[in-house]
Amino acid sequence: MLGISTPRGIIPISGDLLLDSVVPLPVKEAEYLALSGFRSSPFAEFQFTHEHMELMVYNDVRPPLPPSLPCTLPLFSALRVLVVEIVNPSFLAGHTFHKLERCRVLELRDSFQPSPSLFTETVMPVCSRVDIEDPYLLATFKLPQVHELALDFSHPECSMIWEKRIAVNANLSELNLLHMKDWPFDGDLIPILRSLPLLETLIISSQLGVVPFRAFLPMEANGTSGLKRTSSEGQRLDVLCPRLQSLQIEGQDPSVESELIPILKDIVTLRAECGSPLKEFTFSEFGESEVGFGPEPGSQFELIGRNGSFVMEKIVLPEEAKEFELDMSLV
């Protein structure tokens, strides 16, 4: 179903989608476009041809598609928000979205394979907010103005792709918010944080509850931890992301991991001594729904007191509290 927004409401366009069929979608210009596919067969792909969009529906064998029009459609110049969910994003490749400010691409991956459009750039010259799953796809995006980024880090090669491809195409030096979704238990934060000198907010979501917190401690020039050593001892220590003010961890409860408390205390106190104090350091656990019951209230642990010292306070979250997600609405 496609809905077209008008002053009097949303006009839905839908129909019976037969296999191996093409449905024309009369969209020539739009500021906000949301495309959603199916979570199971049949599969759907969008393409641009002539002066409008088309939706192709197929089963297991992808039929050949007619050639798409080069990036001259008015739609590419008018879009300010693009949300693509569970749809093959290959139709983005090779196009320039001149006014696009916010973009979300969440696709259904059965296995981790490089995107077909790996070497074809998609240009978004003014896009400042991006939420994406596939790091290979993100590596093809030219994002000179990106300031807020959400990325799924469960891909086994995500760190390598970040260093060799993403950091090259996107201007990560200007990034001030990063949401790391599905952080893996064996991930290394240091190569990621080194490329983010202006980062102010970092949200790490981990279902496994394992975060290498030593990456937030002051370090010596050779990258080794400077635990328990400060600049007053004659050697100045550096911290990754020196402008980091808000560190939020989702999916971990520090109250049940006593071995974490000394490290968390050092992060708070030593970063402050190095001139990079955190203003917000929280852990959040969200309630889960049970059959026949609503979600349990979640909890949040605030680790910084008003005087900048290390304090751990538990706060009960409301039942409707949700995990962090970048907002794609137009203000």
Image (cartoon, helix red, strand yellow):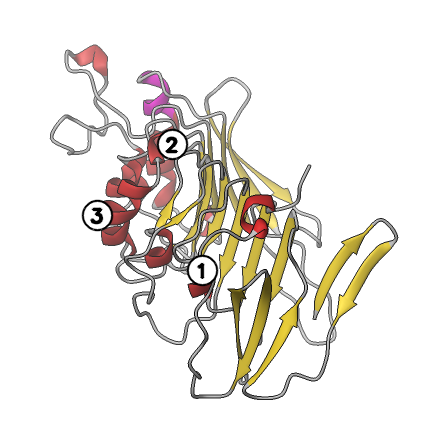
* Residue drawn at the location 32% of the way across and 51% of the way down: 139
Query: Mark 1 — residue?
Result: 207
The image quarter containing residue 11 is bottom right
Mark 1 or 2, closer to the camera: 1
Q: Is residue 238 above or below residue 45?
A: above
User: What is the magenta range?
Assistant: 269-273
Circles 1 and 3, Cβ within 8 Å, touching? The answer is no
Q: Position of residue 98 (x, y in %)?
A: 50, 41
* Residue drawn at the location 39% of the way across and 24% of the way down: 243
**Under tag 1, what secondary structure?**
loop
Q: CA distance from mark 1 to mark 2?
A: 23 Å
Mark 2 or 3, closer to the camera: 3
Q: Which amino acid, by three-letter code, is at mark 2?
A: Lys
* Residue drawn at the location 46% of the way across and 74% of the way down: 66
Q: Is residue 70 above or below residue 330?
A: below
Q: Is residue 124 above or below residue 95?
A: above
Q: Is residue 134 above or below residue 199?
A: below
Relative to 270, 311 lies left or right: right
Query: Mark 3 — residue?
Result: 164
**Under tag 2, what secondary structure?**
helix
Q: Position of residue 7 (x, y in %)?
A: 85, 49
Q: Which amino acid, by three-letter code, is at mark 1?
A: Gln
User: Considering only order in the chain, which callout, 3 or 2, is on the residue closer to the N terminus?
Assistant: 3
Relative to 7, 32 lies left or right: left
Q: Position of residue 15 (x, y in %)?
A: 72, 79
Circles 1 and 2, Cβ within 8 Å, touching? The answer is no
Q: CA distance from mark 1 to mark 3?
A: 26 Å
User: Considering only order in the chain, which callout, 3 or 1, is on the residue closer to the N terminus?
Assistant: 3
Q: Quadrant of the N terminus?
A: bottom right
Circles 2 and 3, Cβ within 8 Å, touching? The answer is no
Query: Mark 2 — residue?
Result: 265
Mark 1 or 3, closer to the camera: 3
